[in-house]
Amino acid sequence: MTTLDAIRLAGLPWSATTARADDPAIVSDVSMCVLASSSSGNCTALRWRENGSVRVCLLDAGLSPRKTRNWLRGVGTNLAQVRSILLTHLDRDHCHVGWTGGRIPGHITVRLHGRHLSRAEEEGLHHHPIVAFNDRIELSPAVRVRTVMMSHDRLGVAAFRFDFSSPGGVVSLGFATDLGHVTDDLVECLSGVNVLAIESNYCPMLQAASDRPAFLKRRITGGRGHLSNHECFAAIERIAPRGHVVLLHLSRQCNRPELVSELHAGSGYSVTIARHDRPTGWVNVGTADPVVSADLHPVVVPGLDRSDPQRKSMVPR
């Protein structure tokens, strides 16, 4: 009986355990790379080694198949290693039309929330087998995912907590974008992850001053659209990730990387700011050194230790 089998029989939470080094149901070298993140397309590669093979899961598929293949090759992997596409929701910037109509390779499993099944059929994804999930997903015996549905437009969006059983214990990744607003359920689900990827979409002042139509501004800021920079910062303070934060989905019109960098400077974590036009580096999950490939790393904001007495909250009061 493996460690994980014993956990299931005992009814214990999987993420609360430490795996034995000789347990076959473990993974290693867990890392993530945001290929792109913006309103023009979102796709993140999550990579690990399991049973001697490299496994890749794509979080959203908002880039064209051609760009996805090219950028995967550019960061040292390929579509043949992708085993799953896990969709947060089906907006076009998260599920590119180029993947519909039976164009997804047969070795890839597409997973989405049951609430999105009817729209998936409308979008032409029904030509590829789909696995629906509700609150939990098992990508393998050593990779478990807990989900929480958030408010975003009509059907909502799924946020994820990944728990990986590794030789040193369970390491975790939180992934949340297009949130609308932050809930207690989201904070509880993602609390204390090693690495947190979360959207920081807009600056309220730039949003108000933009020439966007009033209805679009209301959609974005009205609690069912996106998080502002300060709402994101407040969420990070509550979730308290242990090592690294990756900021997603910055608006190209209503945000600036330098504004985000300034907000997080001096925080208790280091930060990667994802871009729309090139991938980040591979960010280690569960290790002290957050970045694997710094040459691809666009923006890093170093943080102070959380125990530093000089650290102060930067959320406006």
Image: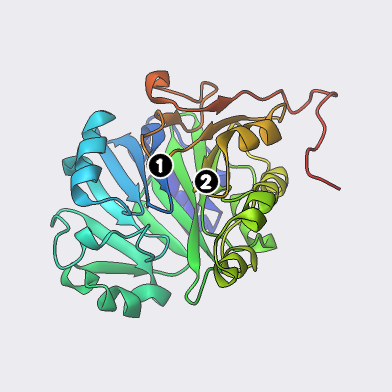
How far across and down, in percent of the image, does residue 93 sit?
37, 57
**Amino acid at dot 2:** Leu
How far across and down, in percent of the image, does residue 13 sit?
55, 53
The residue drawn where x is 62% and y is 69% is 218
Q: Are marks 1 and 2 in contact (CB under 8 Å)?
A: yes
Q: Which residue is mark 2?
A: 250
Q: Is residue 292 visible?
A: yes
The residue drawn where x is 44% and y is 38% is 275
How far across and down, in percent of the image, does residue 45 sit?
34, 42
Q: Is residue 5 visible?
A: no
Per the rendering, the mark at residue 276 is: 1
Report how far apart the C-alphas of labels 1 and 2 lie in the structure: 8 Å
Q: Is residue 246 above or below residue 309?
A: below
- 229 vs 17, left or right, is right
**Amino acid at dot 1:** His
Q: Is residue 204 above or below residue 185?
A: above
Question: Quadrant location of residue 112?
Answer: bottom left
